[in-house]
Image (cartoon, grey):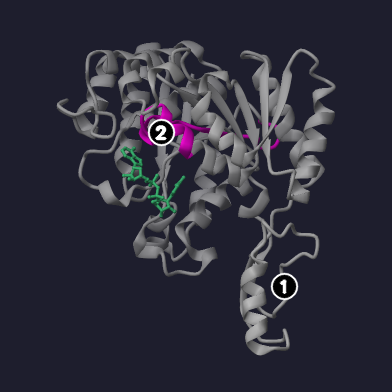
Amino acid sequence: MNLHIAVLPGDGIGPEVTAGAVQVINAVAQRFDHSVTFTQADVGGASIDRYGTPLSQECLTICEKADSIILGAVGGSKWDSLPGELRPEAGLLGLRKHFELYANLRPVLLFDELRAACPLKPEFVKNGIDIMIVRELTGGMYFGKRGRIDTPDVGRSESEPESESRSGSRSESESESGSGSTKETYAFDTEAYSALEIRRIAITAFEAARLRKRRLTNVDKANVLESSRLWREIINSVKDSYPDVSLEHLYVDNASMQLIKRPSSFDVIVTSNMFGDILSDEASQIVGSIGVLPSASLGAKGKLFTFGMYEPAHGSAPDIAGKDIANPIAAILSAAMMFRYSFGLQDEASAIESAVKRALAAGFRTADIALQGENPVGTTDMTATITSFI
Ligand code: NAD
């Protein structure tokens, strides 16, 4: 096959881990006789520095011409004071929106070789951890209306339960003025979902469950949020078409507990953009490190399972950037997902996954997954070891 891949290293450790993914893709291409062309583009902070915008037309054009995208991560304190639409993260959100990549698949797998790096008691994980988080990626609060406004009563609902609202602080500010008309600065972000957006991610999740253990957990906050109530209604209606898949509902606060308490019981989890963002970071810790969590963002119009953007679940990790200590496994496993989902090349995907397992089985660990007394290897050496097992 001739594969055209856009490579967007981004910021922080993005370039380091992306280089690892590219090296492994080259090794797989060589072994399985594919030809690969990589075209690199800047995104996020790197793009701001070069073009004054986190997502340039040049980058979009390169991605549009590619069969799929490999992305590192974006962000860093250098750009933190910029307004929201000019921050590095806007580049990432812009890419997801531009290609309508509404389905983010995040496999959370506890490798046998990394059991010792799992912080949970052995009895909690004796049956392993193998979860697929299906996170909605182009809706919800990250894309809803947001802003700031000077008025005393914006963003507060009469029906909001007392325990969940911050009405206490409002009364305080009103009582200060005695009239309730004191001007105060409010900031708001809107969680909004259409039935269509929910239905398509629900179908993705039920289909994913069908290919696995046929158990779906829906995570929402339907006891408080209207958007979650619609979310749950639609999930229930889509369930009618999947009698073979069992469905449970959990509120997000409870889900965050159950992930720790009974991680082995989960198969597929479907949830909104923000809840998925948070829960997958939590899940990363019970399998050792965020440095081993890959992801695939799918859904591009008419190309649900062909075009995709593949990136580690972690961010740009500025605290360890440039030190050759970042774990490249998440980026490398994201490349495996690309072979599996975008190119339909299962053997190539399996070759990468088993190379990662062999490197771990041989005792190689980066600092984030090394136990006390173990000698960690750097990003470059971990990549070279995995590549040698392809
Ligand atoms: P982060 O994921 O970058 O880092 C969290 C912690 O995990 C840090 O201690 C970091 O050192 C560690 N870590 C992350 N990836 C690692 C790896 N591969 N190997 C070893 N350790 C790793 O999250 P953060 O610190 O909240 O955010 C840092 C920046 O990244 C921010 O600017 C944020 O906006 C951005 N961010 C970007 C993305 C993305 O590009 N998809 C996602 C999350 C955060």
Helix, strand or loop status at disc 2: helix
Q: Is 246 above or below relative to 141?
A: above
Residues shaded magenta: 281-303
Q: Which residue is mark 2?
A: 285
Is disc 2's CB within 8 Å of ligand 1? no
In this view, the residue in front, 359 or 150, is 150
Regarding residue 351, the answer to whether it shows in the image is yes
> Label 1: which residue?
154
Residue nearer the viewer, 68 or 207: 207
Q: In the rendered view, would you say 231 is above or below 246?
A: below
Task: State yes or no: residue 302 in magenta.
Answer: yes
Q: Residue at x 78, y 35 (%)?
A: 199
Q: Secondary structure at mark 1?
A: loop
At a point 75% along the width and 59% down the height, the residue shown is: 160
Image position, residue 85 (x, y; %) = 54, 64
- How busy is the neighbourhood of tag 2: few (under 14 within 10 Å), some, or many (20 plus)? some
The count of marks equals 2
Whether the residue under disc 1 has CB within 8 Å of ligand 1: no
Q: What's the amino acid at mark 1?
A: Val
Kindly indicate the quadrant of the structure image that contains residue 276: top right
Q: Is residue 343 left or right of residue 314?
A: right
Is residue 136 visible from the viewing direction of this image?
no
Does 78 appear in magenta? no
- Say few, some or many: other residues with alpha carbon within 10 Å of mark 1 (under 14 / 14 to 19 / 20 or more): some
